[in-house]
Amino acid sequence: MKKKFYGALLLGSVLLTGGMVSCSDYDDDINSLNDRVAAVEETVKGLQEKINAGCVITSVDPTENGVKVTLSNGESFELLNGAPGAAATVEIGENGNWFINGEDTGKPSRGEKGEQGEPGESGTAATGKYYKPGEDGYWIEVTVGADGKETETETTISWTPEGTMTAVWDSENGKLLVSNVKGYNGILSISLTSELKSLVFQPEFYYQGIEAMEAKTFNYTEKGVKEVNADDDFTTDAPTELDGVAMTPGLVAKYHMNPSSANWKDIKSLSYISDDKNYTRAGGVVKANVFDWEGEEGILTVHSQLTDGTIKDIQNDGKVTVLALQANYSGSEKDTIITSDYAAVKATNYKDMVLANAALGQPVHTVHLYTNAQDAINNAASHEIVWNHEGLDVATLVQTHYDDSQNSHVAWDVTAADKTVEDYGFKYSFELVGYHKGNNRTSESAHAVMKGSLLKPCMPVDGKQPTWDAAEQNKAEKDREPLVRVILTDTVSNKIAAVGYVKFKIVEKATPTESEVILTPEFGFNYEYTVNCTETEKPLQIEWHDFEEDILAQLEKQGISKEDFHTNFELDGGNDDATQYDGKLATSMSTSKKGIVKQTITDTGAEETQIITWTLKNNEAYQLFKNNKSISVIVRYSKEIEPNVYQFVYVTLTWTPNPRNVQPAGTLENSDKIKNYWYAYNSATPGSGYSDIHANVETVGETNADDEFKSDILNTFDGNNVTVSGVNAVYTAFQDANLTKTFTFVDPQSTDMTPVKGNSGTMYDITVGDNGTTLYANVVNNPLVKQAVVKINGSILEYQGKDNETQYSFARDILNAADHAQFVANNEGKKTFTAQIQINAENCSYVPFELENNEFFAKFLRPITISDPHETNFVDATTGGAKADLKLTFVDWRDHNFDNASVTKGQNYYKYYDVESIAQNGDIMTDLNGTTGVFDRKLSDVTGNVKFTFTAPTISEIQNGNGIVNHYFGTLNYENNGTTVGDFQIKVPFDVTYDWGTIQVYVICKISQTEAN
């Protein structure tokens, strides 16, 4: 039974125990009860606040502990179970009745209005009663009158099964009712609706750019018809034409309710404010009187009639009629008036209404119904109906056409069944018209009965049409042709606007006029899937008994035998690799294949049956499953009925793996790292953390060392190998031994690792290239010229630029920007160059392996640092001029002083690092005639007569000395300008070049006052 669930219910068992209790036990019980009551109140408050804010309930589902209510914003609330009994459900069944625990209560869930009477006549009685759950736990009986008025009567019949927690989601009446909620006494009622805050007009179209609604006037010639029945002969039946009619039924306007969950039933009354804008002629303002309204899914539909005045037209009157809707709304605190925005009213005329056959799908002007019985009888039947059809809705085959305001002949509605015309005061009616063929005494139409718009074939009784309920069906009805008269009535004027005739032919089996889909069986598989980087295949097979039950047996019910299927239906594309389709329609097209679908024949011993096997390779399945919980393929069997007309059987195969293992993952434990080689972020203390490693040039004096900058990352890992752990055992292909580990740079963009400042002060942008194995630098705002800085070769970090000033000038400038221990930017914004590195693990390249704790930083230590020991000083007016040898202090990345024999151990560090030149380069700055120690002026700007010259050393003098000193760095010469002077200082820039580039160092020299002055 197909069911529409109005509620969901959960019941959990509560164990009750007895025994003696103390006063403290009672106190505990009371406190516990208070806590439960408070919890319920808080849950209901939160839920109601969300609903009042515009959220709607999307589901009410059972849980282990109670009922979970889910809202449209994704939030959920849980009400805990307080009942000891078994679970119960309250739902609406397929027949529209309320069901409890699957048992039909016989109580309908909704009623229908009685038919409205014609002017001066009373309406018909109500069609019945319906029931709704009351907030006291008992059913409420609702009687619907002919005018739609409902009368409620409380019953003594409970909708809550005794001792259960029951949730009824009654959206028809805007309530969620839950019984036996833990911590709540009685039926908990939660409103599903919120208060109306505003109304926004939903325009039908735009009139001169203004949001507008349409006031339609229907012009037609009234038709007169005679009374007919199914038994007598009305072969010549045809409508007569009477007077012309112009009917304006009124307005149908739609408004968005804010919030969409607002309860439209709290609207006490509706009215329109009308006005004419920019009008210069005489004429009253039209009035629109609201007579009905209804709400659905946040849209309020308002029906009104127009009285008084005239609708103004911009083109003819220079004025437009506008309406604003006012709602008298009954809120929780007080009634309020809510007014919509103004909308224009545009008068339009429609004419030449004619009934048409909606099922043929031809251009609208070619599908009109016959306008008299004789023409319909003399021509072939428009439709077939199978002899045992339980009721074909003729309304789905009929529509109305008219000429619109632009004189285009168009369809008014899709079919009569959609009731579009009813919004404008029209309705359809259907009746059988009797006629006789040849010498038959029994009318053709007596072989059918109608109930509303439903047509059902049947056998006549004593040559006469039976009643609907007494009708019996038999294949002997075949080839009879009942005739149906369709009438479109203007209910406002109570006049007939159009009449048409449709003839049906009763057949044993409908003959398709175009290809049709006759069966769409679906087969599901839930076998586990685990990605494994192989070409292994997984065959999914429909068992022969499933093929028999879900395909062959179902076709038998349609009159297609097993033999017919085996003989005449073929698998599209062939048995070895079937074509796969993008849908299950007659017009569906072939699509790209997912695996291979084959058909084989199995011999069960007694007979042979087709078997369908769907085979997917593991790697192909991964591509499908990595982003989808399930995948489907559709194949098709085809039988050609006549040229280019087919019957199709679409077979859907769906694989929903349980479990679906598509995300292999592991971790790198810090315990796999050699602690002594690792540092905390920006720390200089070994063993302080596992964030950084420090890369350096080769150590002086080691075998074959020549100051190369190569550092093996694996030297920092235990066993000189990266080990991945924590991989789920199900992923056998991704255990550590099967994984290939690689190292790549992490893109530094949008981090503080770019841009960086070079030794020269130039700013460089750092990017990643070469599949993540090269860091590049380009001068900021000049991305077209870039140079490699660092490369990863396997696990080896290789800094670029040794002895190469051109191709790697950017790398050399960046490397020499800061001291090897300058991990945080100094006041010039320079710091040790740092790169972020990622360890990757994979088996096959197309399967991402998620690796945790796999990123770290590498700091590239500048090989040497040069500083000023402040020992280069002069005395003014020294005989022969003041001279001073340049004093510099050299240390390497380990803070080894180049001149400290205890650390150099006989090694010539100057030669190893190839310190090749020292040059004075740049302006000499001074504090002369300024603040002592503040070098803010060029010496040349203060005086042009004080001279300093520098005698540069040779490479041999730097590395081997000049006989006086072991390592000679050059001499500064100072010449007095002929005037005595007091103490002052100069700051002299020098460029020191070695095999990894140039380092700029500033030497501060003190010039003492003139001798004896």
Image (cartoon, rainbow, N blue to C red):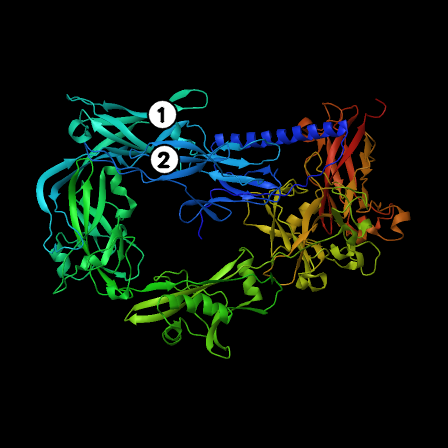
Q: Is residue 164 left or right of residue 129?
A: right
Say which of 4 and 678 sits in front.
4
Residue 493 in the image: state x and y as whole percent: 17, 35
Task: State the quadrant of the C terminus.
Answer: top right
Name which residue type carries label 1. Lys
**Label 2: few (<14), some (14–19) or many (≥20) C-alpha neighbours in 10 Å:** many
Q: Residue at x 38, y 66 (%)?
A: 557
Q: Is residue 721 left or right of residue 851?
A: right
* Residue hosting label 2: 143
Residue 304 in the image: state x and y as whole percent: 26, 30
Q: Which mark is residue 18?
A: none
Residue 379 in the image: state x and y as whole percent: 15, 61
Residue 731 in the image: state x and y as whole percent: 66, 61
CB within 8 Å, label 1 to label 2 = no
Look at the picture and state if 566 lies above or below 969: below
Q: Residue at x 88, y 48 (%)?
A: 903
Q: In terms of secondary structure, where does tag 2 sit?
A: strand
Q: Which mark is residue 268?
A: 1
Counting every numbered tag in the picture gives 2
Q: Residue at x 27, y 29 (%)?
A: 291
Considering only order in the chain, which callout, 2 or 1, is on the residue closer to the N terminus? 2
Say which of 342 and 649 sits in front.
649
Asked whether the viewer can see residue 515, the reply is yes
Say which of 690 and 895 sits in front.
690
Foreground tag (1 vs 2): 2
Look at the picture and state if 304 lies above or below 236: above
**Label 1: few (<14), some (14–19) or many (≥20) C-alpha neighbours in 10 Å:** few
Name which residue type carries label 2. Thr
Look at the picture and state if 739 lies above or below 31: below
Residue with the most extreme right position: 902
Give residue 466's quadrant in the image. Answer: bottom left
